[in-house]
Image (tube, rainbow, N blue to C red):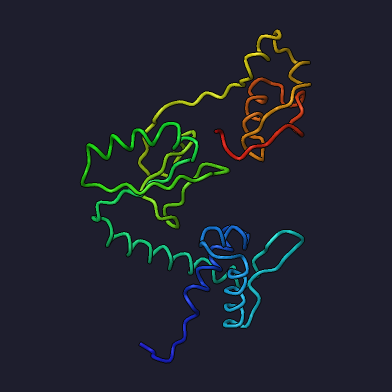
C-alpha cells in the first residue's frame, strides 16, 4: 500500500454524498444530525482537497458540477460497501431497528410493539417514529431493518413485504357541520379545508378520485404537521 496516498476526509465525503443525494445542504444536515453550515464547511474541505467546485447554485436549486458527477457513483458504491460490512457484524445482535410514521405509531403501533416485546423478550426493538412527507425508507443509507410505510406495494425485488391493512381516504367534519344538511359541490367549494401535510396531498387525491380536482380550490385552509 502506498503510505503517501492521501484520501479526502471521510466525514467530508459523507456530507458531500448526502448533499448530492438530497440536492440540499439543509436536508443533508438533517440526515447527518449536524448544522447546515457544517455541511457547507465539509463540502468546502473537499473542494480544497480536489481543487475544484462540486456544487453550483442556480436560483434556489443546487446543481452538481461535472467533477462532482464523476466522483459521486464511486463514492456511493464505497459507502454501500461500508454499510454492508457493518451490517454483517451487527446481523446477530438481536436488535430490530424499525421506522414508522409518527401518527400510526401513536395510534396503532405502540400497543402492538408492547405485545411483541412480551412475547420476544430476547429481541430489543429500537423504534424511530418519523414524520415523513412521503412514506419511504432507504435501507442502504438509513440504519433500519424494516419499516411501516403507506404504499401501493410496488417495492424493489430485494424487499420482503406484508400488507398490514388497507387505508381508506375519506373527508370528515365536525358533527354540527354534518347536521347542517348535505355536502354538495357548492358547499364544499366554500368550506375551509384542513390539510395534515403542506402539499395538501390528501384532499388532492380524494378530489381527483371524485373527479372534482378542477372544481374545488386547494389554496388557503389550515395546514397542520400531524394528524393528532
The quadrant the C terminus occupies is top right
On the image, which quarter does residue 21 sit in?
bottom right
The quadrant the N terminus occupies is bottom left
The residue that appears at 46% across and 51% down in the rendered structure is: 138
| In this picture, residue 100 sits left or right of residue 190 | left
Depth order, front residue of 93/55: 93
The residue that appears at 39% across and 35% down in the rendered structure is: 109
Q: Residue furthest bottom?
A: 4
Residue 208 % position (x, y)? 66, 26
Q: Is residue 158 visible?
A: no
Q: How many marks?
A: 0
Residue 205 % position (x, y)? 63, 29
| In this picture, residue 31 sits left or right of residue 191 | left
On the image, which quarter does residue 92 sit in?
bottom left
Residue 117 % position (x, y)? 27, 40
| Residue 77 in the image: above or below residue 165 | below
The residue that appears at 44% across and 55% down in the rendered structure is: 142
Residue 13 % position (x, y)? 51, 72
Depth order, front residue of 219/117: 117
| Residue 43 in the image: above or below residue 4 | above
Q: Residue furthest front?
A: 176
Q: Is residue 225 visible?
A: yes
Amino acid at each position: 500500500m502506498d503510505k503517501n496516498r492521501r484520501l479526502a476526509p471521510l466525514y467530508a465525503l459523507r456530507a458531500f454524498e448526502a448533499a448530492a443525494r438530497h440536492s440540499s445542504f439543509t436536508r443533508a444536515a438533517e440526515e447527518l444530525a449536524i448544522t447546515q453550515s457544517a455541511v457547507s464547511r465539509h463540502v468546502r474541505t473537499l473542494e480544497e482537497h480536489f481543487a475544484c467546485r462540486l456544487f453550483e447554485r442556480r436560483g434556489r436549486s443546487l446543481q452538481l458540477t461535472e467533477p462532482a458527477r464523476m466522483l459521486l457513483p464511486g463514492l456511493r458504491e464505497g459507502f454501500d460497501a461500508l454499510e454492508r460490512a457493518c451490517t454483517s457484524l451487527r446481523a446477530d445482535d438481536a436488535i430490530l431497528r424499525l421506522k414508522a410514521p409518527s401518527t400510526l405509531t401513536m395510534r396503532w403501533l405502540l400497543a402492538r410493539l408492547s405485545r411483541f416485546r412480551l412475547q420476544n423478550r430476547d429481541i430489543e426493538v429500537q423504534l424511530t417514529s418519523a414524520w415523513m412527507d412521503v412514506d419511504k425508507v432507504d435501507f442502504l443509507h438509513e440504519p433500519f431493518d424494516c419499516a411501516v410505510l403507506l404504499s401501493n406495494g410496488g417495492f424493489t425485488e430485494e424487499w420482503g413485504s406484508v400488507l398490514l391493512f388497507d387505508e381508506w381516504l375519506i373527508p370528515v367534519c365536525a358533527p354540527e357541520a354534518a347536521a347542517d344538511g348535505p355536502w354538495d359541490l357548492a358547499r364544499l367549494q366554500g368550506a375551509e379545508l384542513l390539510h395534515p401535510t403542506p402539499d395538501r396531498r390528501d384532499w388532492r387525491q380524494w378530489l381527483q378520485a371524485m373527479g372534482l380536482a378542477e372544481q374545488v380550490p386547494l389554496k388557503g385552509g389550515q395546514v397542520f404537521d400531524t394528524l393528532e
